[in-house]
Amino acid sequence: MAELAAKVLITAGPTHEYLDDVRFLGNPSTGLMGIELAKAARAAGAEVTVVCGPTHLQPPPGVRWVPVVSARDMLGAVNERFAACDVFIAAAAVGDYRPAERAKGKFKKGAKEFQLKLVQNPDILKTMGRKRRDGQILVGYSLEVKDPLKYGLKKLKAKRCDLMVVNTPGHFGESKEHVWIIDDRGIVDELPPRGKVKVAARVIELVAMLHAGSDVPHLRGFEA
């Protein structure tokens, strides 16, 4: 594995956006992808911090572990640490929306219909993309249902990422992933469904190349 003598900041897991004190909006993410990225980066020699949403998984040894709950919690934790990192990998499945208000206690069942007002959560990766300094490396994750490469590229450019790991919901929350790794010039790699350990190792390998100032290889351009 290539050496990565860098400070790496990773987001992992879901966010929980509470409606009241016992119910929340969330998703099935476990944080496993972020944990495997952390292990791979640590094995390559990096100093690793993981900001993770609620998960039943245990923190990997040798990394700084920052538990959070909501998207705003995660943004705050990332903000505090972003300036000091060399590499930021946004692997968390952050909720796009949250309830406009959180009720105290528990909603009682009443009317047959219930309207819930949602407001948009902060875009953590886009926020960090605006703050990035020269030399920092940003890697995003993009879960897409339709035209994954088209929308993955759009996100990469909008959020000022160096690499975007694009996947589909087919393996969401599972142990295997089918991903494309892209940059603004084309497809860097395509990995058929395989364990997240191998996906993480490939992502960290590419990050190490970028950090060393090397150009990453390409399978093909987007027009091919």
Image (spheres, grey):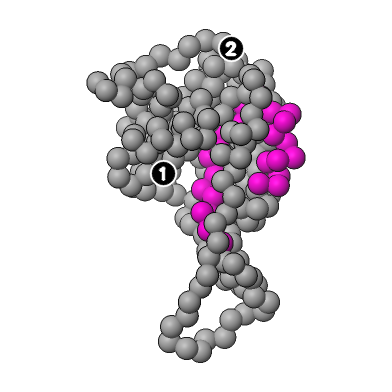
Q: Amino acid at mark 1?
A: Leu
> Measured from the top left, where is residue 90 in percent x and y?
56, 38
Locate residue 103 relative to residue 113 in the image: left or right.
Answer: right
**Above/below status of 111 relative to 191:** below
Locate residue 159 relative to residue 180 in the image: left or right.
Answer: right
Q: Which residue is mark 2?
A: 212
Do the numbered discs 1 and 2 sit on residues whose CB atoms are within 8 Å? no
Say few, some or many: other residues with alpha carbon within 10 Å of mark 1 (under 14 / 14 to 19 / 20 or more): some
Q: Of helix, strand and loop, which one carries label 2?
A: loop
Where residue 5 sits, quadrant-wise, is: top right
> Measured from the top left, where is residue 147 in percent x and y?
30, 40
Locate residue 162 relative to residue 184 in the image: left or right.
Answer: right
Q: Which residue is mark 1?
A: 143
Would you say residue 45 is visible in this rendering? no
Looking at the picture, tell me which residue is in the foreground, 209 or 42: 209
Q: CA distance from mark 1 to mark 2?
A: 28 Å
> Measured from the top left, where is residue 125 in percent x and y?
57, 39
The disc, 1 or 2, on the residue closer to the chain's N-terminal end is 1
The quadrant in which the C terminus is found is top left
> Measured from the top left, where is residue 143 in percent x and y?
41, 44
Query: Magenta residues?
Result: 75-98
Looking at the picture, tell me which residue is in the foreground, 91 or 201: 91
Is residue 82 highlighted in magenta? yes
